[in-house]
Image (cartoon, rainbow, N blue to C red):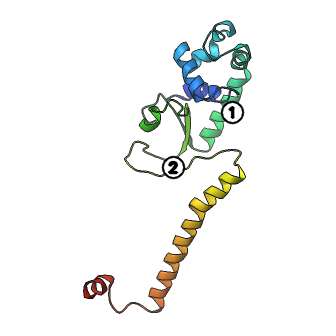
Amino acid sequence: MLREEIKYYVAISLIPGIGCMLAKRLIAYCGSAEAVLREKKSALQKIPGIGTMLAQEIAQQQLLQQAEEECRFLEKNNFQALCYTDSAYPQRLVQCEDGPIVLFVKGAIDFNQSKFLSIVGTRHATPYGLEWCENTFIEPWTYSFNACLRLLAMRLISPPSHSFSNASSSA
């Protein structure tokens, strides 16, 4: 998708009070992300879920400026923005009505392969969320890494006299 098109999806994602489902509804009603931001307030107010306040938020011209800044940041830092209409967007998320309208990705990732691990971040993590991440990811990986180092060190100091396959077949 072209940067110019992405800018409109990013702008919609920046609108306070508009989540993924409402953003998709707006795009469906208006025909495109660009059309949402070009639509008149009076027409936006008629869309289910959009009232006077949200229509006013959408009509702000500052959104496009903010989105342009975001796009420059993405480009400068080698991030890619995948919109939910892109073919590279994860097919599993296409099936979720509340899937994000834009995913920010760094690196070459095929989201449609059968197995992968993903980590989703937040700007404002709760103490519970931080603790959960530490217990789920950091401690096990630290333990596994330390266990591998100890095993390697033991093998270097006193190499085994037999292989694991010999030990298991003689038992």
Whether 90 is drawn above or below 106: the answer is: above
Name the spot of residue 32 as percent of width and height, x first.
53, 18
Question: Is residue 126 in view?
Answer: yes
Residue underneath mark 2: 118
Q: In the visual, does 159 lie left or right of 126?
A: left
Looking at numbered disc 2 in the image, what kind of residue is underneath it? Ser
The quarter of the image holding the C terminus is bottom left
Whether 45 is drawn above or below 2: the answer is: above
Query: Residue placed farthest to the left in the image?
Result: 169
Question: Is residue 4 in view?
Answer: no
Front-lying residue, 106 or 72: 106
Number of residues whose C-alpha sits closer than 10 Å to that of mark 2, classed few (under 14), some (14–19) or many (20 or more): few
Give the number of callouts: 2
Badge 1 element: helix
Q: In the visual, does 98 lie left or right of 128?
A: left
| Quadrant of the rendered image containing residue 72 | top right
Residue underneath mark 1: 69
The residue shown at (55%, 50%) is: 119
